[in-house]
Amino acid sequence: MNESPGAVEFEVAGWPPKKAEAKSLFAAGHPQAERARKLLEAAKEAVQRGGWIPASSEVALELTIRCPARPPGDATNFLGGVADVLQTTLPANVDVTHLGALAKIGLYTDDKQISRISYQELRAATVSYRVRVSAT
């Protein structure tokens, strides 16, 4: 993936995690737990490859979903799920030990730092998505 100074970008196979309930996406047994884990694993690889340091200032979040038909969720649920998973600030009341070292992966401190969002759906034979986070 393209990586430039001030940005990190990566692809993930499958659907992004959706934020659709009050329970944390980081909680063991959450219906989106496997999607969250895959996103964290891809983010970890991208960070190691490009040297991204979690941002402490405003960032832009871009999410592009590739799929053969309409996704099984809406833009706001997917954006919320991705935004939550990629922050380094974890819920205080959730045990994340099941994530191991992945619990320390994040692209920004808190999703409140997101000041610009881009969402796009593209038709493709297989389901995947691209995430790009950049300094603004």
Image: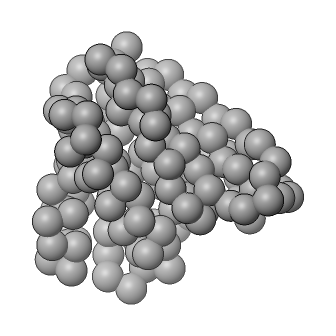
> What is the count of numbered marks?
0
Q: In the drawing, does residue 132 fall left or right of residue 51?
A: right
Percent coordinates x, y for residue 114 in the rendering: 40, 28
Q: Is residue 94 left or right of residue 42?
A: left
Q: Is residue 100 above or below residue 127?
A: below
Residue at image position (29%, 17%) is 5
Reply above or below: 85 against 133: below
The quadrant holding residue 23 is bottom left
* Residue found farthest to the bottom: 29
Q: Position of residue 38 (x, y in %)?
A: 41, 65
Do we see residue 82 in this rendering?
yes
Residue drawn at point x = 44 percent, y = 24 percent: 60
Residue 51 x %, y %: 19, 34
Task: Please say whether residue 71 is visible from this viewpoint.
Answer: no
Name the quarter where the C terminus is drawn. top left
**Residue placed farthest to the right in the image?**
69
Residue at 30% across, 19% down: 6
Q: What is the basis of the colouring in this image?
A: one colour
Nearer to the camera, 110 or 98? 98
Residue 28: image quadrant is bottom left
Where residue 105 appears, x then y in whole percent?
A: 21, 52
The residue most toward the top is 136
Residue at the image position 66 percent from the left and 48 percent from the top = 65
